[in-house]
Image: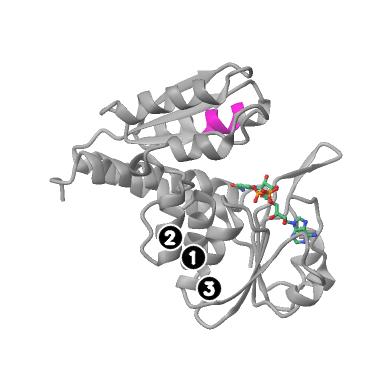
Amino acid sequence: MIIDGRLVAQKRLDLVLKQVESSGCQPCLATVLVGEDPGSKMYVRMKHEACEKVHIVSVKADLPATAATGEVITKIMELNQDPSIDGILVQLPLPPQVDASRVIQAVSPEKDVDGFHPCNIGLLYAGTPRFTPCTPKGIMTLLEEYNIPVRGERALVAGRSIDVGRPMAALLLHRDATITIAHSKTRDLKDEMRRADIVVSAIGKPRFITADMVKPGAVVIDVGINYLDGTLCGDVDFDRVKDVAGAISPVPGGVGPMTIASLMENTYMAAMERSCTNVP
Ligand code: NAD
């Protein structure tokens, strides 16, 4: 089974549009982009396009590549205090001179639609999530939409980043999976992976996960966004692994669209919680 992220994302965007229209709210997302990195610019543009589709207002705060940590934080403070802004998204990665963790911690937890603030990560791990990071949230939506059982399954998350690996593991744990988190120091990834019923790969190495590493019938979710000889590909050797896996998400067209759909869901949620609590 090929897991179609574009289809599910469209379904979710349609739902957000309906919710926004019937809420009487006007959610607003602010993006913060530091520098001119073409990939980051493209992601920010895609997020603004998605906002337009679901009738969420979006504003841009673009800063030069030379911006210091203080300047980025000052901009975020302005957005925190602006009552018209519901969600703030800081596009990562930031230029090397900017202290990313200070910037992430400057975002008001109530407007942290990326869910990276330690308060929100803490709430997630406490089992009472507020904003769930968009990529793992989107993956859980895919598993639900495809009725993929999670309870009691062995799940392996490859990668331990704050944006993908760690929150992914927390979400799978909440759904009663038995979790392994693999990372760059894991002794025998193949051995760990061969035992997993569900594999989520967020490593960032092109076609690194090969067919012999996957248990027959396993569900394989590929988060990786890599380029090999100029071609976009995931962490998984899709053409071969699809013959072994029970279900697999492709790159492109798998997790990527879900990340953006989840951002729209989080922004709508932020608006409801901040300014529209009186609206059912
Ligand atoms: P990261 O660089 O922060 O983390 C990579 C992780 O991979 C690290 O935790 C590292 O320990 C682990 N790793 C490296 N080598 C490994 C190995 N041999 N075995 C097991 N683990 C290993 O990256 P990230 O931000 O988590 O992103 C990972 C990938 O996912 C990247 O390709 C990124 O572009 C992509 N990504 C995609 C989306 C999306 O929406 N589709 C969103 C975020 C990230």
Tell me the residue that label 2 is attached to: 124
The residue type indicated by label 3 comes to Ile
Furthest-left residue in this view: 278
Gap between marks 1 and 2 measured at Cα: 8 Å
Res. 67 image quadrant: top right
Reading the image, the residue beneath label 3 is 148
Tell me where residue 174 appears, x and y as whole percent.
45, 71
Q: Position of residue 219 (x, y in %)?
A: 64, 71
Q: Which residues are magenta?
A: 41-46
Residue 134 to residue 140: above or below: above
Per the image, is 45 magenta? Answer: yes
The Cα atoms of the two marked residues, 3 and 1, are separated by 14 Å
Report if the beta carbon of the residue with label 2 is closer than 8 angstroms to ligand 1: no
Query: In x, y percent, where is residue 29?
Result: 38, 32
Q: Is residue 260 above or below residue 68?
A: below
Which residue matches tag 1?
A: 171
As drawn, which residue projects farthest toward the right?
A: 229
Q: Earlier in the sequence, mark 1 or mark 2?
A: 2
The answer to which of 10 and 193 lies nearer the viewer is 193
Q: How far apart are the alpha carbons under marks 2 and 3?
A: 22 Å
Mark 1 is surrounded, within 10 Å at the Cα level, by few (under 14), some (14 to 19) or many (20 or more) other residues, namely: many
Q: Can you tell which of label 2 and label 3 is closer to the viewer?
A: 2
Q: Position of residue 128 (x, y in %)?
A: 36, 63
Q: Give the residue type that dot 2 points to.
A: Leu
Q: Quadrant of the N terminus?
A: bottom right
Q: Earlier in the sequence, mark 2 or mark 3?
A: 2
The one nearer the camera, 107 or 139, is 107
- Cβ of mark 1 under 8 A from ligand 1: no
Tell whether label 1 touches label 3 (CB within 8 Å). Answer: no
**As drawn, 136 above or below 219:** above
Q: Is residue 70 magenta?
A: no
